[in-house]
Amino acid sequence: MISKILIANRGEIALRVILACKEMGIKTVAVHSEADRDALHVRYADEDVCIGPAVSRQSYLSISSIIAAAEITGADAIHPGYGFLAENAHFAEIAGECRLTFIGPTPEAIRLMGNKAQARETAKNAGVPILPGSDGPVKTFTDAQDVAREIGFPVILKASAGGGGRGMRICGNESDLQSAFEAARSEAERAFGSADVYIEKYLEHPRHIEIQVFGDTHGRIVALGERDCSIQRRHQKLIEESPSPAMTPEIRAQMNEAAVKLCAAVSYVNAGTIEFLFQDGRFYFMEMNTRIQVEHAVTEEVTGIDLVKEQIRVASGEPLSVPHGDFRLRGHAIEFRINAEDPRTFAPNPGKIREFHCPGGPGVRVDTAAYRDYVVPPHYDSLIAKLVVRGKDRAEAIARGRRALELFIIEGVKTSIPLHRAICDDPRFVSGDFSTRFMESFSW
Amino acid sequence: MNLKEILELIDKVAERGIAAVEVEQAGTRLRIEGKLAPPPQVIHTAPAAPLAMPAMPAMPLAMPAPPAAPPEAPAPAPEVDSEAGLHIITSPIVGTFYRSPNPESEPYMSVGDHVSKGKVLCIIEAMKLMNEIESDVDGTVVKIYPQNGQPVEYGEKLFAVRL
């Protein structure tokens, strides 16, 4: 049984884990950098340890400092949150060797699914639809050319070890491919330490739809429905919702089944997300995230399942508490990511929050670690709050989103709130008919 | 509201020593923060009735809260600067502080000992690794902050050295 959890993260997700622990009667240890002394996760945890200077590499990414903090506080488990070390197989391995329960999947599963080419291969072998493309990395331009000719242009080059949109290049024809190939390889080398790239067919107007999955140590795997994350800019998600406006019960059943098949193929344990591209009624496996996601709250709102508590229970060896048999998504939930950034240029805008007022009322949930007079440090992610609204249907959820965004007051730093308000008033967004390219043509 | 009115408002705020004023008019919201008036001076007369207080040697006598005290917590009493002129060596890592290489041996360093740059001061154990912490100055050890075997955080004070 887990009695004390060290949270190897900061910000709203660290607080989210603390909330779950409080409800379960589990003690918490916050770790923090020198820049986060006044952070809320530090204040609300039972114990806290300063693990290093502001720079992440020497604090939130320092495996030895985090393990040492667990040792001196007597924690028996580590929750990695998302980002930082959440998908670092080496960290999960070391935690295990130090007899700390890692609240997440096994190091083997993290390693396998973290490599995009291997993940694609695994999906293919499990019978999960994938985009036509190269089997593994393409080493030379001639190989790339052969694959592109076979599957047809446009194609996209992706870094095998990549993520977050970096190292990706779209090629409309052979001359594009020629100039992009070496550039993509060197970009991949610089960003991820591996020059391997692979080729896939490029879809012109896909939706990003992902399935929340959960496995326990008793061999049970469940799929908890989808999240539509098509509203993105530069491959960074802005708005996520469930159910997807494009979904039918038949396709959902197929996607859930495919997601479960893939997890079964790697004996997946704990929370994970299978990302698909969806276009013209067909879906294709894109990648798997072996962690809790930023947007997990959307699924919590429509399923009534506390995913973070479920993570802790499963890590303790308990079976999933999700009821057997079919279950329905209840109502509609939408998450708006509130970032401290310029809503037009997306330039980060750290600084002191002078005024902070959270909206409330029916169907409104705010996950945040910000408060009045809090200083958003320049060293980390710009996410300062997640506004999650729920309604009986999509129209009610949007109406609640609109009024909650109006009542959400943050002053002192620029935020994405004005952008979200504009999107809520956009006829195309309201109609539900959009793709991942929505933001390219959105003007306000 | 035009610029002239805003400037007048700023003058008034400064004149009257108002901490902050907020005005909302026709969709425009304006907040002006003045310089906070200094906290009221406390005049120490006869010692106040004895209060149960935790031992805080470096703190000047705290005043008993007057009935009309502002709702904010009183400003923290200034720490007596007993470390002026001393060089403080802080912990570069999280871990457990040990004064000697093993339980049987003598401590590396005691108060009054002379240290030179590069000399080992203590060990900090992290992840079963013994990390020797070296002095970055020459001087005399005048204080050792943690107890032997005590956990220390990053940046926590370890030694005070008189240069």
Image (cartoon, coloured by chain):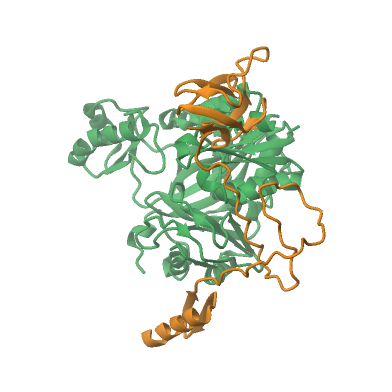
Chain colours: A green, B orange
Q: Residue at x 55, y 28 (%)?
A: B141
User: A2 or B22, which is in the foreground?
Assistant: B22
Splitting the image into 4 quarters, where does residue B107 fall?
top right
What is the quadrant of the C terminus of chain A in the image? bottom left
Residue A26 on image: x %, y %: 74, 41
* Residue A200 appears left or right of A55: left
- Height in image: A298 above or below A9? below
User: A65 or A103, which is in the foreground?
Assistant: A65
User: A79 or A106, which is in the foreground?
Assistant: A79
Q: Is residue A237 visible?
A: yes
Residue A317 on image: x %, y %: 72, 31
- Height in image: B52 above or below B143? below
- Height in image: A71 above or below A155? above
* Residue A188 appears left or right of A230: left
* Residue A174 appears left or right of A375: left
What is the quadrant of the N terminus of chain A in the image? top right
User: A289 or A409, which is in the foreground?
Assistant: A409
Please count the marks in the image.
Answer: 0
Q: Is residue A326 visible?
A: no
> Which residue appears farthest toward the front when viewing the image?
B46
Q: Residue at x 77, y 43 (%)?
A: A25
Q: Residue at x 45, y 62 (%)?
A: A413
- Height in image: A226 above or below A265? below
> Which residue appears farthest toward the top when viewing the image?
B104
Residue A24 on image: x %, y %: 75, 44
